[in-house]
Amino acid sequence: MNLGQTNLYLARMTDNFIEYLKNYIPLDKEDISKLYTFSEKKVYEKNEMIFCEGKISHDIYFVVKGCVRLFYNVHGKDRTAFFYTEGQFICAGESYTFQVPAKENFQAIEETTLMIFSRKNTDKLLEISPKFELIARIATENELISCQKIIASFVTQSAEERYKELLNNNGKLFQRVPQQYIASFLGVSPETLSRIKKRVLG
Amino acid sequence: MNLGQTNLYLARMTDNFIEYLKNYIPLDKEDISKLYTFSEKKVYEKNEMIFCEGKISHDIYFVVKGCVRLFYNVHGKDRTAFFYTEGQFICAGESYTFQVPAKENFQAIEETTLMIFSRKNTDKLLEISPKFELIARIATENELISCQKIIASFVTQSAEERYKELLNNNGKLFQRVPQQYIASFLGVSPETLSRIKKRVLG
DNA sequence: GCTAATTCTTGACGAAGGTCAAGAAGATCT
DNA sequence: AGATCTTCTTGACCTTCGTCAAGAATTAGC
């Protein structure tokens, strides 16, 4: 791939970012230019760590392309709690909000392009225009809704039911995410997920 | 209790509501008067249903006094997923945001006083002043953080560990909430919680 | 394309949790 | 306070899941 192609590729990815935000609210050229001024783009390679537990989070990330997993460290083993794909914001909420050390780890599962908004820049954007405040609120609301659904699934469903639902609603995830990560997302061991799969798919 | 006492009591409860909001942001007299104009206070008796699944949610609630449980109906049995106490907002997020039928049920566990904000009034408040937009965003952020913690606890902890943590961080809940509700919140049967209790407390 | 890692599957076994049922303890109502 | 209803506890049994270990399949690196 030559440089010209690479630039074209990155330009398209950046457009995706704006397209995703336009789902929330219309943006004019000035808004878009401000977004670029107050953000930074970064490409992470497969398995690269984006953010590690113990640090204080100063950034909000937006997935332009790729897939990120959120995992926690439990007695040396890691447990995946969430996946972020194109169009989603990533943030270690408690650490970012209250400036306490984070328990979260974020890792790129595949080559992943993120827009990064520092706290300073985010605050500036929120001040500049109520549009960005609205985007922030809607993005937060959407993430809250998906978190509430996950909790509901833990309280109301068996591991097998959660597996079936994930297969129906987000089956592509199985194509891009190692099964062991999905297992812990579903709250079971890799071996159990393997057996559930066999049982369900025959 | 005579009428005079009742009014005094309700006045104090209402002040609590404003006090809680002042934790988010300073409010002047005009803000406070607007909040009263665009909300309604209602007292629910013990075990009274506040909102039932299948309906479309048009309201956000704020707990002034009392305790509310969120539960889902699973094959005729109910599973408690969350408790709301003084100072928290309650909302059937997906239903309220996208106007689809809700899966959530909200029930008062004790006599409970709520401030009710209709969608219409909420939108009006958000338009009137960026202060209310800020309150909305912070309240949403806080609920998101607590949801993320719950998911983390399901993914990283055993039922016994979740029990111990709840005992440490929110032990009062055991004084006001029937144990069977806490059991399903922890993701286990009432019998299992009973055994965990015996094991942990001796 | 071959080798070396890594990941996934399978079996065996033990630990943990669910269910049913019956009795104890606690709450509620008049 | 006594009767009734509900909730909590306990035991027995069974199902499900986790763990360990070994082999199969897939992926990654050279």
Image: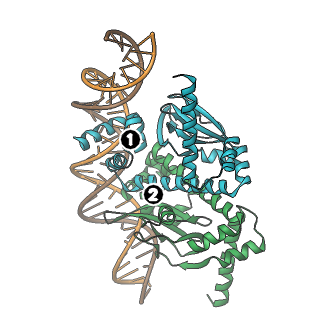
Chain colours: A cyan, B green, C brown, D orange
Is residue B197 in sight in this rendering? Answer: no
Quarter that holds the N terminus of chain B:
bottom right
Is residue B176 in sight in this rendering? Answer: yes
Residue drawn at (34%, 49%) of the image = A168
Describe residue B154's horizontal placement relative to residue B129 as left or right.
left
Q: Secondary structure at mark 2?
A: helix
Q: Secondary structure at mark 1?
A: loop
Q: Amino acid at mark 2?
A: Phe
Q: Amino acid at mark 1?
A: Lys
Which one is nearer the viewer's eye here, C16 or B151?
A: B151
Residue named by callout 2: B185
Describe residue A192's horizontal placement relative to residue B201 as left or right.
left
Residue named by callout 1: A172
Q: Is residue B132 positioned above or below A66 on the image? A: below
Q: Residue furthest front?
A: A4
Q: Residues within 10 Å of mark 1 (few under 14, many from 20)?
A: few
Q: Position of residue B95 (x, y in %)?
A: 47, 65
Q: Chain of mark 1?
A: A
Mark 2–mark 1 Cα distance, whole angstroms, equals: 30 Å
Q: Chain of mark 2?
A: B
Which one is nearer the viewer's eye here, A173 or B60?
A: A173
Q: Position of residue B32 (x, y in %)?
A: 72, 73
Residue B35 falls in image quadrant: bottom right
